[in-house]
Image (cartoon, rainbow, N blue to C red):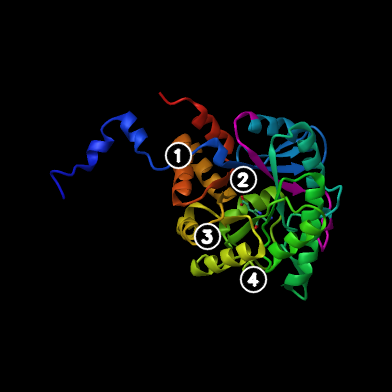
Amino acid sequence: MGFPRQRMRRLRESEPLRRMVRETVLAPSNLIYPLFVREGTDQQEAILSMPGQFRWSVDRLIKEATDVHMLGIPAVMLFGIPDHKDERGSSGYDPNGIVQRAVRALKDHLPGLFVVTDVCIDEYTSHGHCGIVKDGRIVNDETLDCLRLMAKTHAEAGADMVAPSDMMDGRVAAIRDELDRGGFEHVPIMSYAAKYASCLYAPFREAASSSPAFGDRCSYQMDPANAREAIREVRADVEEGADVIMVKPALPYLDVISRTRAEVDVPVAAFQVSGEYSMIKAAAGQGWLDESKVTLETLLSIKRAGADLILTYFAKDAAKLLNVATP
Ligand code: PBG
């Protein structure tokens, strides 16, 4: 039955009807806000490559997280910027490290805010790689020991969920084992399962001073050309015990989000990364794009592709826009 009996435009004629037949709805509860935490007090240090984003000292982080919470965003994701870096990233698994202290402070002041921690040593290593380096190679299994400890100290500090982003093989199983043995069997793991070796992390690496000192991350992060391989990564992580699966970056990888959604039944998260944020900020800053509209359209598209949860530096802005009552 085609035209003229079928007219697609009938359902688009009025605003209330468009709302009634809308297939995808974005809500603040879908969002997770990434936050950078640094040493010191009363610090709100601007990140130049990410306008509107800051490195917060723990005291100021509490205030910022209170705003996030008030906007109806259920969760934050913490990234640590330590004062000291070494070969093994040991400041990352120090029970008194910057993230561990930030988690404790957040859970003390805002018990209702869900705190997720990024588990990866790159922000804490002197060489900037996500694994231990031996003879110029990133060694897998030895890195797992660091990740176990990091995840455990985060859980001990009160983290509600841990999110390994290193792309070492076997890290979900190793972390699950460590958490279970430490009495944290209730703490879920959100695995950055399909994390691509993307150039879109550049602003983040400036924010965290975590650019690799030599080489690149291609021996552990995925080749942007591969989608089937992403499904193998996702399946492996689900088998190892991942509770939530993440695809990263988001917008250039909507096909991967969509395939992941079709392949597994666990919740799917997508990370709209620093470069995606900065591209929009830059174009909007020039007056070439309407920032609010691009923000909502990109987030909606990521959700439509199949993401249940979206990590985005636009979370606060999006929540404000979404909280404005529709007629
Ligand atoms: C690694 C990590 C990175 C990001 C999240 N976790 C950087 C990297 O892999 O180089 C990137 C996030 C972003 O670009 O917003 N700890």
Q: Mark 2 against mark 3, which lies toward the viewer?
A: 3
Q: Mark 3 against mark 1, which lies toward the viewer?
A: 3
Tell me which label, 1 or 2, sits earlier in the chain. 1
Q: Quadrant of residue 55?
A: top right
- Residues at discs 3 and 4 in contact (Cβ within 8 Å): no
Tell me which label, 3 or 4, sits earlier in the chain. 4
Q: What is the secondary structure assignment of the residue under circle 3? A: loop
Could you tell me the amino acid type at mark 4? Ser
Q: Is residue 32 above or below residue 125?
A: above
Q: Mark 2 against mark 4, which lies toward the viewer?
A: 4
Mark 2 is surrounded, within 10 Å at the Cα level, by few (under 14), some (14 to 19) or many (20 or more) other residues, namely many
Mark 4 is surrounded, within 10 Å at the Cα level, by few (under 14), some (14 to 19) or many (20 or more) other residues, namely few
Could you tell me the amino acid type at mark 2? Ser
Q: Check disc 1 and report the residue beneath it.
A: 25
Q: Give the residue at x 83% y 38%.
A: 40
Tell me which label, 2 or 4, sits earlier in the chain. 2
Does the magenta-highlighted stretch encompass residue 80?
yes
Residue farthest toward the bottom in the current orientation of the protein: 135
Expressed as whole percent of the image width and height from the top left, the position of residue 52 reads 61, 36
Q: Quadrant of the C terminus?
A: top left
Q: What is the secondary structure assignment of the residue under circle 2? A: loop
Q: What is the secondary structure assignment of the residue under circle 1? A: loop
Residue range (magenta): 70-90
Whereabouts is ligand 1, in terms of quadrant?
A: bottom right
Mark 3 is surrounded, within 10 Å at the Cα level, by few (under 14), some (14 to 19) or many (20 or more) other residues, namely some
Res. 219 mark: 4
Q: Is residue 223 left or right of residue 129?
A: left
Could you tell me the amino acid type at mark 1? Val
Spatial CA span between label 2 and label 4: 26 Å
Q: Which of the pair 77/197 is nearer the observer?
A: 77
Tell me which label, 3 or 1, sits earlier in the chain. 1
Spatial CA span between label 1 and label 4: 38 Å
